[in-house]
Amino acid sequence: MHVLGLDIGKDSIFAHLLLVDGRCHSLAAVPNTAIGFEQLLQWARKHQVGGAELHVVMEATGVYWESCAQHLYDQGCQVSVENPARIRYFAHSKSRRGKTDAMDAELIAQYGATMSPKVWQPPSPALHELKLLVRERSALLVTLNAEQNRLHAMNHRADAGTVLLGLIQQRVAFLKVQVQTLEKAMHALVGAHTSLSEPLHLLMTIPGYGFLSAASVLAETDGFALLETGTQISAYAGIAPAPFESGSSVHRRGRISKVGNAHLRRTAYLAALGAQRSKSRMGDFYRHLRAEGKPPKVALVALGRKLLRTGLAVVKSGQPYQEAYRRPQLPRPSGP
């Protein structure tokens, strides 16, 4: 399949086309607008390439890739949106020297031709809106926490000015109202779409999941659309174990990879904080790890990973969480 690598910036797009016969072509600086997207497609058609036979690969850089990916997907192209870290590691493997937008487009095309990344599917409008609401709430909570810390410090100053104190209090009150408004909007959105409410209610049957954590997990995984196994969701969240061992002399303490969705990873950790105190198998799992000598944070990370894997299994099965469920044991192969 022909591969089109795109380096997408705020204002412009650089393209590099790799044809199956080995020929390549470059296109510089078309605008990152609907007009530019059409120019890309017309340029590809001049080389007798388009539609489903064109695999377009790009990086998930901020929000600048979204309109281009959606437009090309709507035109029948196969689109892949990759983590920039993977492209960066691929560049290291190529011993690439130098960096320009044109070079980046060529590298992305080479990555697509070599690695054959998964095809991207755009989320439903409801899931997309839910993700926007979830992330906006998270951003506001960071700002609210900072302002509350400033208010605490101002209240303990010997010479706190009434004007400054009043302004900070107003900001804190305003941010709290905005957080509440976002949460109401999330509830209304979920209530209006069964495609959101059904998996969300399934997640909420699992100890540790509340409405907000379940909504965040659904939003960050696009409803588990492209995830099928526990290993996949652990890797996607960057919460999979990453051992560091070599031979008999290198044995560093293992840690999680953190190469993945940081929003999902944080949600899993917060859900684990709630589940650890429950009188359930989830709580028992945490207490068992602690009894084995695992540090509290290590046990919480393991519990967060278990919550994500369990959530995936529950939503995929369409059945609520069952405390007494045990995975059936596979029969052992009989010997000769």
Image (cartoon, rainbow, N blue to C red):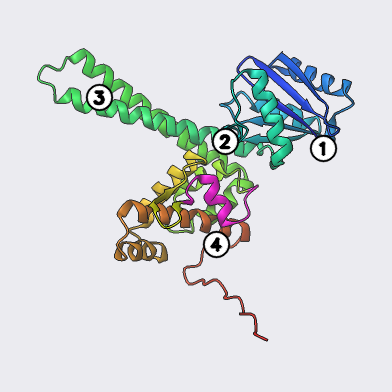
Q: Which residue is mark 4?
A: 320
**At 61% from the left edge and 49% from the top edge, which residue is drawn?**
224
Q: Amino acid at mark 2?
A: Tyr
Instruction: Give coordinates of residue 174: x percent, y percent.
Output: 36, 24
Query: Which of the two labelled residues, at mark 2 and mark 4, occupies the earlier sequence position?
Result: 2
Dividing the image into 4 quarters, which one contains the N terminus? top right
Residue 208 appears anywhere in the view? no
Instruction: Give coordinates of residue 214: x percent, y percent.
Output: 49, 48
Query: Which of the two labelled residues, at mark 1 and mark 2, occupies the earlier sequence position?
Result: 1
Q: Which residue is mark 3?
A: 150
The nearer-to-camera label among 3 and 2 is 2
Q: Amino acid at mark 3?
A: Arg
Magenta-colored stretch includes residue 269: no
Which of the labelled discs sits on residue 89, or is there none?
2
Above or below, 101 against 305 in this view is: above
Give the quarter of the image for residue 162: top left
Query: Which of the two labelled residues, at mark 3 and mark 4, occupies the earlier sequence position?
Result: 3
Instruction: Give coordinates of residue 271: x percent, y percent.
Output: 41, 50
Distance between the alpha carbons at the discs numbered 2 and 4: 40 Å
Residue numbers of the magenta segment: 225-242
Instruction: Give coordinates of residue 83: x percent, y percent.
Output: 58, 35
Distance between the alpha carbons at the discs numbered 3 and 4: 43 Å
Dot 3: element? helix
Distance between the alpha carbons at the discs numbered 4 and 1: 42 Å
Q: Which residue is mark 1?
A: 1
Query: Which of the two labelled residues, at mark 3 and mark 2, occupies the earlier sequence position?
Result: 2
Toward the viewer: 275 or 297?
297
**At 41% from the left edge and 29% from the top edge, which residue is drawn?**
140
Toward the viewer: 245 or 38?
245
Toward the viewer: 31 or 29?
29
